[in-house]
Image (cartoon, helix red, strand yellow):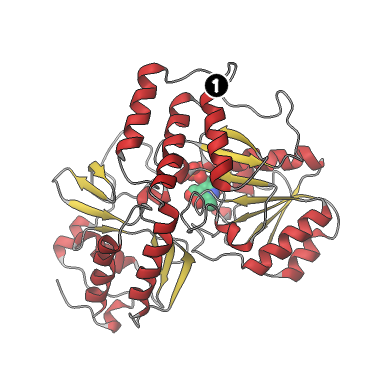
Amino acid sequence: MPAVGRRGMRGVYPLCKKEKKMNDTKTIESGLFDVYPRFKITPEKAEGVYVWDSNEQQYLDLYGGHGVISIGHTHPKYKEAITTQLAKIGFYSNSVDMPIQEELAQKLEAASGYAGYKLFLANSGAEANENALKLASFHTGKKKVIAFKGSFHGRTAGALNVTDDAKLSAPLNKNNFPVQFIELNNEDQLKEALKDNDVCAVIVEGIQGVGGLDAPTESYLQFLATKCKKSGVVLILDEIQSGYGRSGKFFAHQYANIQADIVSMAKGMGNGFPIGGVLISPEIKASYGLLGTTFGGNHLACAAGIAVLDVLKEEKLMENATEVSNYLVEQLQAINQIKRLKGKGLMLGVEFDYPVKDIRTVLLNKYHIFTGASANPNLLRILPPLTITKEQIKAFSEALKEILA
Ligand SMILES: Cc1ncc(COP(=O)(O)O)c(C=O)c1O
């Protein structure tokens, strides 16, 4: 393993042949529609914050399968809840009474502090946002949406239209309703965008994920919430990645002490079981047929969702997220090549002034640590399970120190 000099880290870090081979992301000939560049690693089992591949190599998972693993891989209570439920009934449609959905809604209301808000269950983040946008439009009778530069809200038609990445849209889902992208934290642009009284919703991420960990400031969120209320505009907080305790609060926007009209969530909600949902203000009224889904809120997904909320509470994982994050930040602040640390809790971005691709490769191949990337090529993304300990995360800061020494 060659030593890495500062100059070397500026994009020309020389990988040895073995590393190049291990990092080869070419996809083998297969029956799969080839849309993902994949590392040649085959995870076969996982537990807590670790994953093992088919060669029994252990990896520290600071990526959490894209911010999905909240209570840790294969948590015993989670496994038991899903298997017990499966042995009873795995699925029935939303045409019958589902006490398990009621239990999830009640526990979510208590955990989130969103008293009186109603829950609609879906299967993914994009679907949650799709329903949030639709509700805002039904409620206001309007169709323009304000979204933010750098945003990512998912890959279904409506969610894509409010995502600030034109490459992801096919011709048929470009401009399917009017959207204005404004800069985060720019109050003047918000005032200007709201002035024609034609807006149904503002959609904003608690902390931007894919975009690279930029976030609305607390004072901007307070301004935004007040403006939306005054203008009769529905404020949608996309907490799909930053929610479920990841930031150290249940939802990241709760640092600003504001309430949204709709909160969308997914990822950590099911710890890997596909589930998404929206919490909806009591001011937005439900009626039969307004929203619907076949699989959303099925028994298995609810069992997974309830287990997640129980473990988050019992193991005080939000507190742990803050504690471990503070420790990691302290460690990283001692590394002078790091330009900036972004994010909150266990949703952190480590920014350099050169691309991090090679650092990620060495972390993975030599130190066996998964990390994430983002639209910002200079940013490492850290999204570990919320159960991670200081001891476990120390392996990352130590590895980074060695790589950059
Ligand atoms: C903030 C945010 N919103 C929405 C989505 C879309 O979620 P899904 O991939 O479950 O549709 C993502 C996924 O990365 C996300 O990070």
Which quadrant would residue 185 be assigned to in this image? Answer: bottom right
Looking at the rendered image, the quarter that the N terminus falls into is bottom left
Tally the numbered discs. 1
Front residue (pair 137, 35): 137
Q: Residue 360, how many percent across, how many down?
A: 30, 64
Residue 78 shows in the view: yes
| Picture coordinates of residue 180, whole percent (x, y) | 71, 57
Q: Residues within 10 Å of mark 1 (few under 14, many from 20)?
A: some
Residue furthest right as drawn: 196
Choose top left, top right, bottom left or bottom right for residue 118.
top right
Q: Is residue 52 left or right of residue 249?
A: left
187 to the left or right of 114? right
Image: 222 above or below 25: below
Q: In this view, does 233 lie to the left or right of 132?
A: right
**309 or 314, which is in the foreground?**
314
Amino acid at dot 1: Met
Residue annotated with mark 1 = 98
